[in-house]
Amino acid sequence: MKHFLSTEEISKEELEKLLVLAFEISKNPKKFKKALDDKIVATFFFEPSTRTRLSFESAILRVGAKVISTENANTSSSAAKSESIEDTARMLSGYADAFVMRNGDDDSAHRAARVSTIPVINGGSGSAQHPSQSLLDAFTIFKHKGRLDNLKICVLGDLKKGRTANSLVRLLSKFEGLQVFSFAPKGCEFNCEIPHTVVKSFDEIPHDVDVLYQTRFQRERHDGKNAVLPIIDKKVMERFSKDTLLLHPLPRNDEISTDVDDDPRALYFEQAHNGVFARMAILITLLGGKK
Ligand code: NCD
């Protein structure tokens, strides 16, 4: 694997290897503390981030590498002087051994990878892809379900402009027997070619669905009014089986009520923490770490 750009381009075998490594890391992270101790990794973020940038930087430090970082790249890097993504990637190729980039353009990671001489990791590209998020989502599902085959998942929220559900469904579609349901208001519909059943109410979602994957309204990617998203609260969760996992990439607004936070099926905070292991696995896989 040269870059980590989209869940479409990663094979099932590569995914399985990444997941096995992420599990090994999660059992004993200290074993990997020198894995990349001769490397420098850059993080270059044009869009806001809490989890992705900081968990990548934590992962970089936990594998013994060093980090150089630009946040608010639109204003604090030469992108403010109209430098292109391609020229930025050429520069980073001389300063680091790999870089993580987040940008609002759907094609940004691929544009960077076309000219980069070092591995490019997509930290979120427009409404299209967020592959490291999908890996940590899959890690969390596997940890709690013990399988990625024969999953029944319902993705909810802003499925049109949100990249996480898109990216995750594409990853899970590599495994056997996936059934996908989508529940989104008008203007936020799921326009993914992976077969899925559109539902219009919580009642239409099978009560034994394995995963409810809620997402927020992507206000910054829509013009005009907010859409009203399906809200998951304690009462809604009563409809679902004790084995239904509730995931959300975060940040949440009000689409998951805080009264659900102490439900054992609500995994979103653990999910975000799993991001460190998943990202350590991505870095070691791309940069070839020693133990
Ligand atoms: C997501 C993103 O950036 O796509 N956040 C994240 O990385 N966990 C979700 C979002 O912003 O809604």
Image: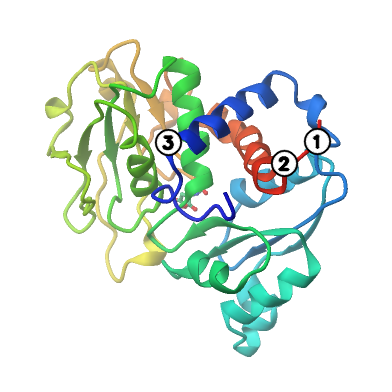
* Identity of the residue drawn at 74% across and 42% down: 58
Residue 182 visible from this viewpoint: yes
Q: Is the residue marked 2 within 8 Å of ligand 1, measured from its CB?
A: no
Residue 262 visible from this viewpoint: no
Q: Residues within 10 Å of mark 2 (few under 14, many from 20)?
A: many
Quarter placement of the C terminus: top right
* Identity of the residue drawn at 58% across and 83% down: 84
| Tag 2–tag 3 contact (CB < 8 Å) | no
Distance between the alpha carbons at the discs numbered 1 and 3: 24 Å
Distance between the alpha carbons at the discs numbered 2 and 1: 15 Å
Q: Which residue is nearer to you in this view: 208 or 194? A: 194
150 to 168, vertically: above or below: above
- Percent coordinates x, y for residue 130 in the rendering: 47, 51
Which one is earlier in the sequence, the residue at label 2 or at label 1? 2
- Relative to residue 219, is residue 66 drawn left or right? right
Residue identifier under label 2 = 59
- Relative to residue 85, is residue 131 drawn left or right? left
The amino acid type, in three-letter code, at marker 3 is Lys
**SS assignment at label 1:** loop
The amino acid type, in three-letter code, at marker 2 is Ala
Residue identifier under label 3 = 12
The amino acid type, in three-letter code, at marker 1 is Lys
Kindly report which numbered mark, 2 or 3, lies closer to the viewer in this rendering. 3
Q: Residue furthest top?
A: 242
* Identity of the residue drawn at 17% across and 21% down: 206
Snapshot quadrant of residue 265: top left
**SS assignment at label 3:** helix
| Tag 1–tag 3 contact (CB < 8 Å) | no
Residue identifier under label 1 = 290
Q: Residues within 10 Å of mark 1 (few under 14, many from 20)?
A: few
* Identity of the residue drawn at 56% across and 67% down: 113
- Percent coordinates x, y for residue 186 in the rendering: 16, 54
